[in-house]
Amino acid sequence: MQRIFITGVSSGLGYGLAKVFLERDAIVYGISRRAPDCLIDLGLRHRCVDLRKEDVGRKAISHMVQQVDSFDLVLLNAGKLGQIRDMVATPLADIRDTMEVNVFANKWLLDVLFSNSRSIAQVIGISSGASQSGSRGWNGYSLSKATLNMLIKLYAGEQLNTHFTSLAPGLIDTAMQDYLTELPADARYAPLETLKAAKGTEAMPDGYGCAQKLVQILPNLLEKQSGCYVDIRNL
Ligand SMILES: NC(=O)c1ccc[n+]([C@@H]2O[C@H](COP(=O)([O-])OP(=O)(O)OC[C@H]3O[C@@H](n4cnc5c(N)ncnc54)[C@H](OP(=O)(O)O)[C@@H]3O)[C@@H](O)[C@H]2O)c1
């Protein structure tokens, strides 16, 4: 039976991924601050963890996985967007907070999961096209996703028995897109118009739809070099 670990299972893509794997009878471990009661009813093993709180988080996750000696897949999905605004208008404290959730938490989390000689066959860091585009307004989010790509590459160079990918999942109709598509039109932040046009179309599936696509392309990812960045739209 497959064992999967997923961060950010309370909404959006993470919720969809956990649901898809539970429906396939996998054993799914998930964390988020909010508890996804419907998934817990389906068998999700869940802990409420705030990824900005390393000490408490390490203890909770170590305890949660202590009986597990291997994972087939770890999905580092939890993420924070922050506000769309210029760099100059973005407080450093906000960028630090985004880096904490989108990057640094994934470092200590991987260390916890790899501890006690636990083996992991595949790790996917959920990245974003924003890690490449550097579009005006995407400030700390772009910084954090570009750094996440490098974190994944660095771990790939160390953990030679694990296959790593930074995966941009394409547009997904989640809370993040609700925020983006409800912003007033602003010529400075050009991608907003593209997102507004994509909302409600096939170009922006919901979390469950995107999760189904992602699960289908898992074998394709294993053919790529470990540690590389892949955009699902280019597969
Ligand atoms: N939506 C898109 O179009 C899109 C595009 C490209 C990439 N992505 C990436 O896809 C991933 C999922 O995003 P989404 O769109 O599904 O967003 P979402 O619906 O806002 O879900 C984010 C998830 O991350 C968790 N999370 C956030 N902060 C956390 C914290 N401090 N501690 C623990 N968990 C935390 C949330 O759980 P709690 O709030 O319960 O803690 C939630 O389950 C993210 O990495 C995002 O960057 C999304």
Image: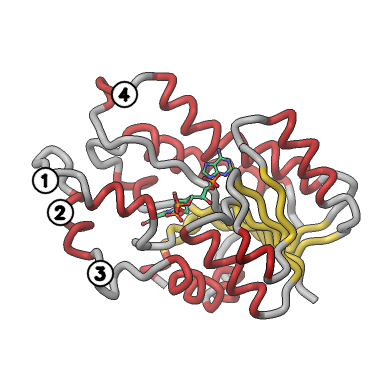
The one of 98 and 36 positioned closer to us in this rendering: 36
The one of 217 and 163 positioned closer to us in this rendering: 217
Which one is closest to the eye, mark 1 or mark 2? 1
The residue at 66%/50% (across/down) is 31
Amino acid at circle 1: Ala
* Residue 163 location (% of width, % of height): 67, 60
Which one is closest to the eye, mark 3 or mark 4? 3
- Residue positioned most to the left: 187
Residue 185 is tagged as 1
Q: Residues within 10 Å of mark 2 (few under 14, many from 20)?
A: some
Task: Tell me: residue 133, above or below residue 162.
Answer: above
Q: Mark 3 or mark 2, which has the lower sequence index?
A: 2
Residue contact between numbered discs 3 and 2, judged by CB atoms under 8 Å: no
Residue 200 is tagged as 3
Which one is closest to the eye, mark 1 or mark 4? 1
Alpha carbon separation for disc pair 3 and 4: 30 Å
Ligand 1 within 8 Å, label 3 CB:
no
Alpha carbon separation for disc pair 3 and 1: 18 Å
The residue that mark 2 highlights is 193
Which SS class for mark 4? loop
Can I make out residue 99 in this image? yes
Which SS class for mark 2? helix
Q: Mark 3 or mark 4, which has the lower sequence index?
A: 4
Residue 90 is tagged as 4
Q: Mark 1 or mark 2, which has the lower sequence index?
A: 1
Q: Mark 1 or mark 4, which has the lower sequence index?
A: 4
- Residue 221 falls in which quadrant of the image? bottom right
Alpha carbon separation for disc pair 3 and 2: 14 Å
Alpha carbon separation for disc pair 1 and 4: 19 Å
User: In the rendered view, does 62 fall on the left or right side of 56?
Assistant: right
